[in-house]
Image (cartoon, rainbow, N blue to C red):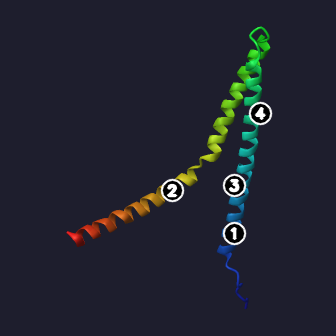
Amino acid sequence: MSVPSPFDPTLEQELQTLEQDYQAFKERYLQVQRDWQRQQELKERYEDVRGRSLQERSAELRTELKQIQQQLINLEVALESRLFSWKGVREVFWQVVRFGGLGIIIGWMLRSCAG
């Protein structure tokens, strides 16, 4: 005859899920920090190269400017996609539906009582 464990296995699973979500959030946050720093460095380099006189600009510098612009665009997309998650939107959507619907129902009840 085995003695049942005092620990709830679903609680342990929830804790593991929470730890995984936290780790994923932490990694995403660090990646956003690195991308933001890289974006700032590229912007500074872009302005430095762009600020040179037209005589100093060579085909190599123009190519570098185009590469910097493309990297900046890629970083902006990466930053936006990391900050915007469908999971967060889904949770907010259902909260709006839930509480918005509840507000409408309460409003109808108050209106019927008052009218």
The crowding category of the residue bearing disc 1, from other C-alpha atoms within 10 Å (few below 14, some 14 to 19, many at least 20), is: few
Q: Spatial distance from mark 2 to mark 4, Cα to Cα?
A: 35 Å
Quadrant into which the N terminus falls: bottom right
- Viewer-side residue, 42 vs 95: 42
Q: Earlier in the sequence, mark 1 or mark 3?
A: 1
Residue type for callout 2: Val
Q: Circle 4 sits in a helix, a strand or a loop, which is it?
A: helix
Asked if residue 65 is positioned above or below residue 28 in the image, the reply reads: above
The residue at which mark 3 appears reads as 25
Q: Which residue is mark 4?
A: 41
Of callouts 2 and 1, which one flags the residue occurring earlier in the amino acid sequence? 1
Residue 15 got which mark?
1
Q: Which residue ends up furthest to the top in the rendered image?
A: 55
Neighbour tally class for label 3: few under 14, some 14-19, many 20 plus, Cα within 10 Å: few
The residue positioned 72% from the left and 89% from the top of the image is 3
Residue 114 found in image quarter: bottom left
**First-in-chain label (2 vs 4):** 4
- Determine the secondary structure under disc 1: helix
